[in-house]
Image: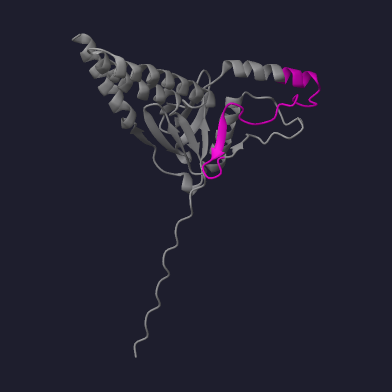
Amino acid sequence: MTTPEPQSPSPQPSEPVSKDRVYRSPAGIAGGVLVLALALWLGIDAVVAGDGRTPWAAAAALLFLVPLVAAYTVRPAVYANEDRMRVRNPFRVIVLPWGQVESFRSAYSNEVFTEGGDKYQLWSIPVSLRGRKKAARREDRRLAGGGRGRGGVLGGFGQFGARGDAGGASAGVGGGAAGGLDDGPVRAETDKVMDELRDLLEARKAAEASQGEVTVRWAYEIVVPVVVGAVALAVLLGTG
């Protein structure tokens, strides 16, 4: 009698990727929503109540403006986990494994540099010179007070949020201690975000799961309607 060969165990599912932290600008989103609401109100009113070529021009303007405004205000976001970061800019989506990231730079804008020398701006984490000056004044007061505290200023993102996809709960960078205890120099909110990204890069750059190629995808869902709307608007205005 033939002895049956033992069955190989079924492959186990791969470990799930760690949850993304999402960095966005609530101020930018709020401004974009207001502009979009105003544009839709005026545009729809012109489409419904306009005469002659006005409804067509208004429709073309909406097709051009709505995705363009959304691209620069509501759309930008940075997603980061232990394996890679995904940068969603107005017209492109860039996926950068940590092994391909060389460094971050914060001057008049926040940027990420790859090992290949490419540079990508982080649209959802804009630099606030006003925020830096405010943080510098708070730091001066902290040092003048002998480092006894931060005047009730806790660590965290302030205007900028980092939240997990699953729980959606806001979390602060550096875990500011309750009660205003001294936990280091006062930093602007966007600088705290960049510090966290730098720490994640340093910790995960050499990990096996963090290797791969940089990929760039154009956001055709934004580009196509903007181009079509611009062409239609130009034709209507040029032949009017």
- The image quadrant where one finds the N terminus is bottom left
Residue 106 shows up from this direction: yes
Q: How many marks?
A: 0
Start-end of magenta stretch: 139-168
Q: Is residue 193 left or right of residue 63?
A: right
Vertical placement of residue 60 versus 15, above or below: above
Q: Is residue 85 left or right of residue 220?
A: right
Q: Main secondary structure of the magenta part?
A: loop
Residue 110 shows up from this direction: no
Vertical placement of residue 165 versus 159, above or below: below
Task: Say whether residue 238 is magenta.
Answer: no
Question: Quadrant location of residue 89?
Answer: top left
Where residue 85 appears, as percent x and y from the top left, is: 47, 37
**What residue is shown at x 54% (from left), y 21% (from top)?**
127
Question: Quadrant location of residue 150?
Answer: top right
State the residue lying farthest toward the front: 49
Where residue 195 appears, as percent x and y from the top left, is: 59, 31
**What residue is shown at x 28% (from left), y 14% (from top)?**
50
- The image quadrant where one finds the C terminus is top left
Vertical placement of residue 119 versus 42, above or below: below
Where residue 179 appears, as percent x and y from the top left, is: 77, 32
Q: Is residue 57 left or right of residue 184?
A: left
**What residue is shown at x 18% (from left), y 10% (from top)?**
239
State the residue lying farthest toward the left: 239
